[in-house]
Image (cartoon, grey):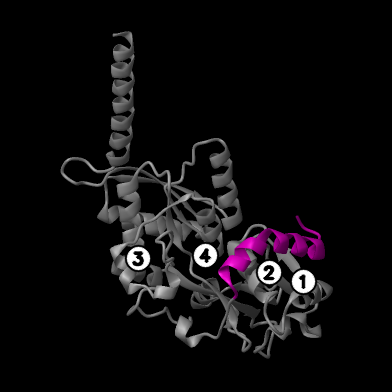
């Protein structure tokens, strides 16, 4: 009888725990099917762009309160790793620079598989086959030039290591920018660049700053004349009247897709899926184009001044190799530029 009582008590406790988990998982969607609750959104997008995305999402889902954490990709991932160590990842949805970052999270089993119905309108090669993440836009790293100080617009990456550019080149740090970390992996595995490109940049007096926004501001102000930077910030600044020119070098450009994915331990799965659907939807992609990004969805045109992925010569490398080598690549970069 004592054993029977223990068995009943244990079963009851197990049922209570299971019910609690089921309730928590479905708490985002009430009995009427309305999506609501809090959504923690972690992103490396510029502040204004993240705000615009959240505001547009809330027009569709006004009962979801979105809490945003914004920083460079590397710092966003550091925050997630710290939360993981503490046993409580707070992020629900993640939107950061590149697929290599998501491959790392996928390898560590931190992502929830979700194949959005909107994904059928995204090029297949830009969607993770296991549904762990999906590209949201096309962003090339190109060259920015100050047109007041540089009279002959260059065509090649070699311009950054020329005598004319000596001491006047700026680029983002791979310790902060996910795009810069991706570029580092791609360029160093690409003929005719390799590690010689970064050694030559250092020898030519190239300065490393925190992120792409800092590069754009410094070149636009004329403090530096050349920069390595994501294309959309240059097109946006030029449209606003800044004395800058966007150059897609003839050798080709690395391209990131700023993927979106859902964390495995999300506390609001329904709202997370709705957010991913919105980002990939026609409305979400039109918003991306409106604020100056090249959309990834088929049938939506790129903003003026930007090339579509079909118009670019894309430099790439094996995603798995880039993921496995990222920390070693950053270490070697740090040794060249005296950073860590």
**N-term mark: 1 or 3:** 1
Q: Which mark is residue 171?
A: 2
- 2 or 4: tag closer to the N-terminus: 4
Please identify the residue farthest to the left as the structure is shown: 32
**Considering the image in quadrants, where does the N terminus appear?**
top left
Sequence-wise, which precedes: disc 1 or disc 2?
2
Q: In whole angstroms, how far apart are the C-alphas of marks 1 and 3?
A: 37 Å
Q: Secondary structure at mark 3?
A: helix
Which residue is labeled 4 in the image? 99
**In the rendered image of this protein, does residue 137 appear above or below residue 67?**
below
* The C terminus, quarter of image: bottom right
Which of the marked residues, 4 or 3, is nearer the chain's N terminus?
4
Where on the picture, by quarter, is residue 120?
A: bottom left
- Answer with the quarter of the image where residue 115 lies: bottom left
**Label 1 sits on residue:** 206
Residue 105 seen in the current view: yes
Q: Which mark is residue 280?
A: 3
Image position, residue 254 (x, y; %): 58, 76
Compared with 190, 268 (above or below) is above
Sequence order check: which comes first, mark 2 or mark 3?
2
**Residue drawn where x is 65% and y is 69% of the image:** 185
* Residue 286 position in % (x across, y down): 34, 71
């Amino acid at each position: 009888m004592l054993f029977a009582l223990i068995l009943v008590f244990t079963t009851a406790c197990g049922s209570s725990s299971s019910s609690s988990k089921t309730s928590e998982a479905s708490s985002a969607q009430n009995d009427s099917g309305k999506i609501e609750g809090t959504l923690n959104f972690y992103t490396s997008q510029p502040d204004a762009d993240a705000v615009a995305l959240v505001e547009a999402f809330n027009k569709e889902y006004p009962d979801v309160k979105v809490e945003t954490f914004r920083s460079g990709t590397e710092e966003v991932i550091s925050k997630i790793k710290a939360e993981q160590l503490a046993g409580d990842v707070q992020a629900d949805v993640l939107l950061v620079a590149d697929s290599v970052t998501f491959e790392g999270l996928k390898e560590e089993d931190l992502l929830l598989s979700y194949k959005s119905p909107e994904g059928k309108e995204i090029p297949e090669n830009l969607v993770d086959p296991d549904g762990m993440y999906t590209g949201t836009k096309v962003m090339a790293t190109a060259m920015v030039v100050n047109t007041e100080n540089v009279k002959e617009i260059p065509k090649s990456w070699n311009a950054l290591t020329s005598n004319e550019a000596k001491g006047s080149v700026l680029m983002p740090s791979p310790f902060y920018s996910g795009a810069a970390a991706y570029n580092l992996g791609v360029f160093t595995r690409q003929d005719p660049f390799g590690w010689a490109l970064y050694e030559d940049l250092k020898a030519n007096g190239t300065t490393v700053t925190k992120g792409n926004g800092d590069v754009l501001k410094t070149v636009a102000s004329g403090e530096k004349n050349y920069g390595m930077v994501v294309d959309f910030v240059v097109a946006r600044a030029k449209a606003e009247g800044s004395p800058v020119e966007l150059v897609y070098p003839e050798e080709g450009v690395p391209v990131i897709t700023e993927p979106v994915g859902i964390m495995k331990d999300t506390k609001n799965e329904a709202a997370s899926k709705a957010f991913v659907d919105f980002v990939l939807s026609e409305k979400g992609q039109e918003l991306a184009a409106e604020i100056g990004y090249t959309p990834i969805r088929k049938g939506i045109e790129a903003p003026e001044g930007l090339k579509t992925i079909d118009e670019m010569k894309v430099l790439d490398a094996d995603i798995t190799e880039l993921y496995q080598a990222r920390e070693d690549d950053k270490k070697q970069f740090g040794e060249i530029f005296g950073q860590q």
